Image (tube, grey):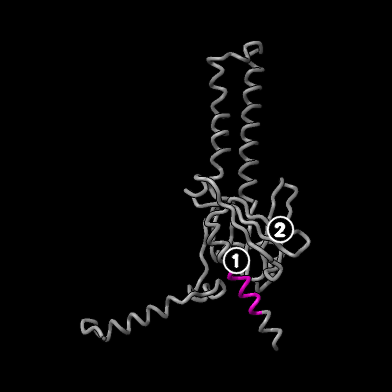
Amino acid sequence: MPDIFISPEDVEKEKSEKKNERKTTPSQAKGKSGHKVHIPLWASYGYYPENVKFIDQEPQENVILFLRAHLITNLGWILVGVFMIFAPLLLEKFPLLDFLSLRFQIVAILGWYMITMAYMFEKFLSWFFNVNIITDRRVVDVDFTNLIYREITDANLNKIQDVTVSMGGVFRSIFNFGTILVQTAGEKNFIEFVDIPKPDTVAGILSDLRLEEENRGKGGSKL
């Protein structure tokens, strides 16, 4: 029985909203939004970032997701670094360097601060340059070891066999980050996205891309 209290305009509006609720694939999302998003330099999660490029990126290859470890994962080494910065102040209460002359005490403290800065800088670089990228064609894993060595692993979407999300513990649940293991049929059996934000969302986007790639392959085989 029709509801006499609903106007025809409201009925048409409701139908229009239902049409707009249809699910879109990641490759269609950019077309709907009309533009890419500029992400900050320190971002851990970027959906269709406009300011992300990588080595060996193909001309028509679009970056869909840019990922690195969640910002909160830096808390441990930051606290250690802060402790190391203020540690020399304890020498006033615990004179461990009294056996040295004042000149050598200054040298020892400066050496300690150089070690502290080197430790914090290395930890920051490791977080900043260890990134994962998902494009409309493949997944890319960049492992940064030091300033002169890095390892880049990639796998085409049609080579992905399984995607597993690991998100255990209260801390990870509160801040919504976890690890994704991507099993592939390539030379490297798996690609790991470690401690990335929104792992369930990323796994869902990756699954949609796999399905889209499979459908594209089936359509091409029919031709």
To which residue does mark 2 refer? 190
Question: How many numbered dots are placed on residues in this image?
Answer: 2
* Residue 101 versus residue 21 in the image, above or below: above
Residue, far right: 187
Lateral position of residue 170 relative to residue 135, left or right = left
On the rendered image, what quadrant is the C terminus found in?
bottom right
Q: Tell me which numbered mark, 2 or 1, is placed earlier along the sequence.
A: 2
Measured as percent of width and height from the top left, residue 58 is found at: 69, 70
To which residue does mark 1 refer? 206
Q: Which residue lies at the image location 76% right of the left edge and 59% below the top edge?
A: 188
Measured as percent of width and height from the top left, residue 6 is found at: 24, 82
Instruction: Give the structural element (helix, strand or loop) at label 1.
Output: helix
Residue, far left: 5
Label 2, label 1: how many angstroms apart (C-alpha)? 14 Å
Q: Which residue lies at the image location 76% right of the left edge and 64% below the top edge?
A: 186
Q: Which residues are magenta?
A: 207-216
